[in-house]
Amino acid sequence: MASNSILTNPEALVALRNLERTNNLLATTQNRVSTGLKVTGAIDDASNFAIAQGIRGDIKALGAISQGLNNSKGIANVAIAGATSISDLLQTVRQKLTELSNEGITTTQRQILTNDFTELLSQAANFIDNAVFNGVNLLDTAGAAPTINTLSNLAGGTLTLTNADLRTQVLSLAAVGLGTANAAQGVIANAYSNLESVVNAALGSLGAEARALDLQTTFLDQITDATEEGLGNIVDADMARESARLTALQVRQQLGVQVLGIANQAPQILLGLFQ
């Protein structure tokens, strides 16, 4: 090829290609700086982008699982609060039943104690009514499923909350007759003992299950943090390196423009041959 052609300028073509390459690299670096990512799409790195998308799906799924566990923790904590209040109330109920077991009280005193007993159980029923979280009441579950299962991991494992039908037991105790000392003693041995046993069992199971939910939530938070860190290792840009690369490419771009300008001036030198 003629080196002194006004139609073809090889030096300018080389300079243009180098400038275009620099501009492409500069655009890539600017995109990394603006997004903070070295892999923003499949074009950047198809395999790593596909891996990253799968990890992002796992992170979102872990978030959904944690949300479900937190919801179940709320259900359990409200139920525990209700059962604890009933347990505290039963101490006073036991006191009234013991007083009613005394044959030395008058008819009037027995009626006063019976009314007090009835009010205490009415309050226990109110505790059950209010032990609701997100529409679920673990203490009022006659006819309901015996357990509530909550998804706990990506493999499909579950954690269980056990229902306790305290309302039936409270109503059963409220319906007893307390007309005599012997009747009150019988209530202590039967209806009261049954309710106390059910309440204690509910506190034991719900406490253990709530603790399991709490431990699993903490574990999932740690897993999510580790997964996000792994995702960052795959797709996050090293901003210190990108900053240095950006500065270098800007200098290269300026030099490339100058070189292209010099190469474009070469054909003008040939005009001197025709003067």
Image (cartoon, grey):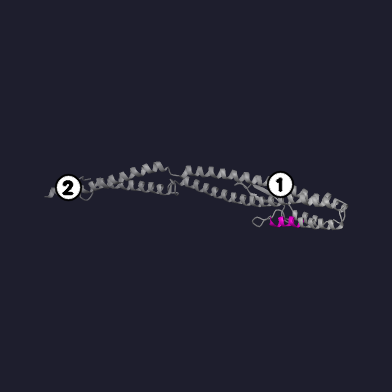
Compared to 125, does 208 lie above or below?
Answer: above
The x and y percentages for residue 82 are 70, 52
First in sequence: mark 2 or mark 1? 1
Q: Which residues are magenta?
A: 121-130
Q: Which residue in the structure is indicated by mark 2?
A: 269
* 30 or 2, nearer to the observer: 30
- Evaluate whether residue 163 shows in this view: no
User: Is residue 146 a member of the stretch shown in magenta?
Assistant: no
**Quadrant showing the N terminus:** top left
The x and y percentages for residue 62 are 57, 48
User: Is residue 125 a member of the stretch shown in magenta?
Assistant: yes
Q: Secondary structure at mark 2?
A: helix
Q: Quadrant of residue 123?
A: bottom right
Q: Could you tell me if the residues under marks 2 and 1 are in contact, i.e. CB atoms within 8 Å?
A: no
Circle number at residue 205: 1
Q: The disc labelled 1 sits on which kind of residue? A: Ser
Q: The disc labelled 2 sits on which kind of residue? A: Ile
Q: Is residue 178 left or right of residue 167?
A: right
Circle number at residue 214: none
The furthest residue to the left:
275
The x and y percentages for residue 239 are 41, 43
Q: Is residue 142 left or right of residue 13?
A: right
Q: Secondary structure at mark 1?
A: helix
